[in-house]
Amino acid sequence: MLLQKDLNPALNTVTAYGDGFLEINRVRYDSAICFAPEGPVRSLALRAAADIDAAFLQDLVGLKPAARDPLAFLDDEAPAAERPADAPEVLLIGTGPRQTFLSPDVLRPLLALGIGVETMTTQAAARTYNILMSEERRVLALLLPGDPS
């Protein structure tokens, strides 16, 4: 399905999607990808939403663990991560042709820092990304294409 007729070459735009593929700026990808409005489109080795864990998402958005206090175990508190200045407002996760919810434990570190995380079908995530990107929002998309039929 064609999503975007006109193209702004300075911004990453989902231009089409179909069974087992995604198209960003008219370049076809057959694997999971991650991208923001600006910057590279990264191919990922993910096969399914079940492969996504908290550490993967933290790395994806650029969270760095806080400096560890050697006596922190006495306070029963986990060290907080530091939110990068360029962290996204929202992370959209397209889980393929069917929506798959991620465990709250996977999402908790991002939510604790005020980064919204939305999981939906890849088609819905692609459309939502284009809308948020056109509104100049700081959005990051992680899209799994799903298996071709």
Image (cartoon, rainbow, N blue to C red):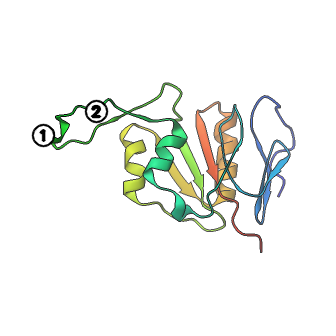
Farthest front residue?
A: 70
Give the residue at x 76% y 41%: 13
In what quadrant of the picture does the C terminus appear? Answer: bottom right
Q: Position of residue 115 (x, y in %)?
A: 46, 39
Answer with left or right where residue 23 lies relative to residue 80. right
- Residue 48 drawn at (x, y percent): 59, 64
Quadrant assignment, res 8: top right
**Residue situated furthest top in the rendering:** 85
> Which of the two residues, 65 or 148, is positioned nearer the viewer here?
65
Residue in the image at 71% along x and 69% along y: 147
Q: Mark 2 sits on what residue?
A: 68
> Where 145 sits versus 77, above or below?
below
User: Callout 2: 10 Å neighbours few (<14), some, many (20+)?
Assistant: few
- Across and down, in percent, residue 106 comes to 42, 54
Three-letter amino acid code of the residue under disc 2: Arg
Q: Is residue 130 left or right of residue 59?
A: right
Residue at image x 42%, y 43%? 110
- What crowding class fits label 1: few (fewer than 14 Cα within 10 Å), some (14-19), or many (20 or more)? few
User: Spatial distance from mark 2 to mark 1, Cα to Cα?
Assistant: 13 Å
Please state which amino acid type lies under the numbered disc 1: Leu
Q: SS class of the residue under badge 1? A: helix
Query: Relative to residue 91, is residue 22 drawn left or right?
Result: right
Location of mark 1 (residue): 74
Q: Nearer the viewer, residue 32 or 73?
A: 73
Which numbered disc covers residue 101?
none
Secondary structure state at the residue bearing disc 2: loop
Left or right: 115 as drawn, with respect to 37: left
